[in-house]
Amino acid sequence: MLALLTDLYQLTMAAGYWQAGVAEREAVFHLTYRRPPFGGGYAIAAGIAPAIALAEQLRFEPDDLAYLATLRDARDQPLFAPDFLAYLGRIVPAVTIDAVPEGSLVFPHEPILRVTGPILQAQLLETALLTIVNFQTLIATKAARVCQAARGAPVLEFGLRRAQGIDGGLAASRAAYIGGVAATSNVLAGKQFGIPVRGTHAHSWVMFHGDELAAFRAYADAMPGNCTFLVDTYDTLEGVRHAITVGRELRAKGYELGGIRLDSGDLAHLSIEARRLLDEGGFPDARIVASNDLDEYLISSLQEQGARIDTWGVGTRLVTAFDQPALGGVYKLGAVRGRDGQWAYSIKLSEQPIKISNPGRLGVRRLRRGDELAGDIIYDTDAGLTSTALHDIDHPLRASTRPVHDRAEDLLMPHLAHGRRVREPDALVTCRDRARTELAQLSPRTKRFLNPQPYPVGLDDVVHARKLKLIEDGRAGGRSAADGPRGAAKGGVQ
């Protein structure tokens, strides 16, 4: 399924591996990101379960192969050899994937996924894994920031109509729930993922009836147990008064007014006045819901102004990750097994230190002190972790640091082994709880929106020394230090 959800160059490289007879050579790739999104200090890993499901089902159907057979090269010859297409048709998923548990906090340069297996298959998965994990991680992180600004008040995700297409809307609802929203307006997401759904009526309901009071009464007749009235179609405070009138009529029938929604105007002032009217009218428990292009910055501002808002409806700026359209995650080769059975380490070089990849078969050890996150160390899984010294990744000549900690745990966990699932996906509510717990353990300095303090992440002694050696050798001759006479893996740009 979805084997063609990839870039063409993945298939042309796959054809090259096949032609050279190395398609089954074992390789290791790491999916990471370089900078936290939104100018923040962290990201929340999301999209892990659908990414694993896609990798588990990597197969080329006959119509996929028929389409590939129609592609032509610059000389109008078949782009792919028939024997190569036949090889693709025989592929059985064989990769091993270790991943962080979904909902975990992840930081720059740390592997979110480690993909090990035949290089042809691992290469073909790159694009699909990136598009799933990049987007959902971005949205989960945005949702967490919005929920932080809400200071514990419920946040409702209202973004489907503004999302980037149907799949974007569903994926955003899923990821936003992991990030902490309480519910979604997206009914299909509710069905597929078990997310609570919320909603009432739109301005068109009031406009259809022409008279706001009549509209509220008609809605109360139809949905007496779901009455939160949108009060700003004509005059907001008059709309609040109409809601109070209908609320009294509901109460006489044994129902309660759920609340009102504000969708325009000065939300701080209007919410304060609406709260006064509701309290004086005998509805102190009626909730005030606010929407209207909200994000973490506007919510924070409204909080500082003393707004009396109980629930926040956030749509466009959440599901489109309004101020950062992409995470920028990358998928880099870390090692290839040579013909002698030994691993040869690969590195991508760059004039920008942040873009130099980290070589090896990497894991992440999370250090904890009490109930706080103390730091993360990236180490080589074959060499094991011999020291907890953290070597700065972006500034490798800085002195190493040693975070004080009392326990540690590995983040990457087996999900697929040679193409077969070995770990069932966590329930979405479990992922959501994990994100909430880890955020509570993260320093407030790292969670602040403006100039957050970087969380300590570094390389261990082995990976740091190997990286420096590969950089030195790569600058000198464009080969990796691990090449030697084997030629199993090239350094430099890959």
Image (cartoon, helix red, strand yellow):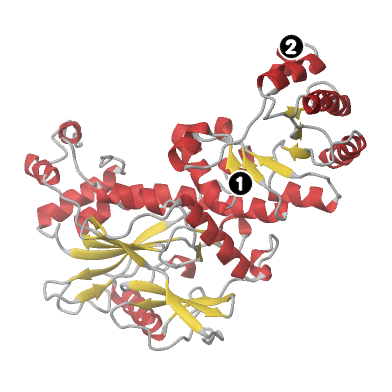
Residue 213 sits in quarter: top right
Q: Residue at x 66, y 24 (%)?
A: 223
**Is residue 123 positioned above or below 194 on the image?**
below
Q: Nearer the viewer, residue 274 or 39?
A: 274
Disc number at residue 407?
A: none
Q: Residue at x 46, y 86 (%)?
A: 388
- How far across and how far down the image is residue 82, in percent? 8, 39
Q: Quick check: can you spot residue 366?
A: yes
Residue 257 sits in quarter: top right
Q: Earlier in the sequence, mark 2 or mark 1?
A: 1
Local crowd at mark 2 within 10 Å, few (<14), some, or many (≥20)? few
Q: Quick check: can you spot residue 127?
A: no
Disc number at residue 209?
A: 2
- How far across and how far down the image is residue 360, in percent? 31, 74
- How far is disc 2 from disc 1 in space, using C-alphas? 31 Å
- How far across and how far down the image is residue 422, in percent? 27, 60
Q: Seen in the image, is 176 located left or right of residue 216?
A: left
Q: Seen in the image, is 47 located left or right of residue 39?
A: left
**Is residue 82 positioned above or below 480 on the image?**
above
Q: Secondary structure at mark 1?
A: loop
The kind of residue on which mark 1 rests is: Ala
Q: Nearer the viewer, residue 448 or 267?
A: 267
Which of the image's four quarters has the C terminus? bottom left
| Residue, disc 1 | 182
- How far across and how far down the image is residue 105, in percent? 52, 64
Q: Nearer the viewer, residue 15 or 206?
A: 206
Q: Nearer the viewer, residue 302 or 9?
A: 302
Which of the image's four quarters has the N terminus? top left
Q: Seen in the image, is 33 located left or right of residue 99?
A: right
The kind of residue on which mark 2 rests is: His
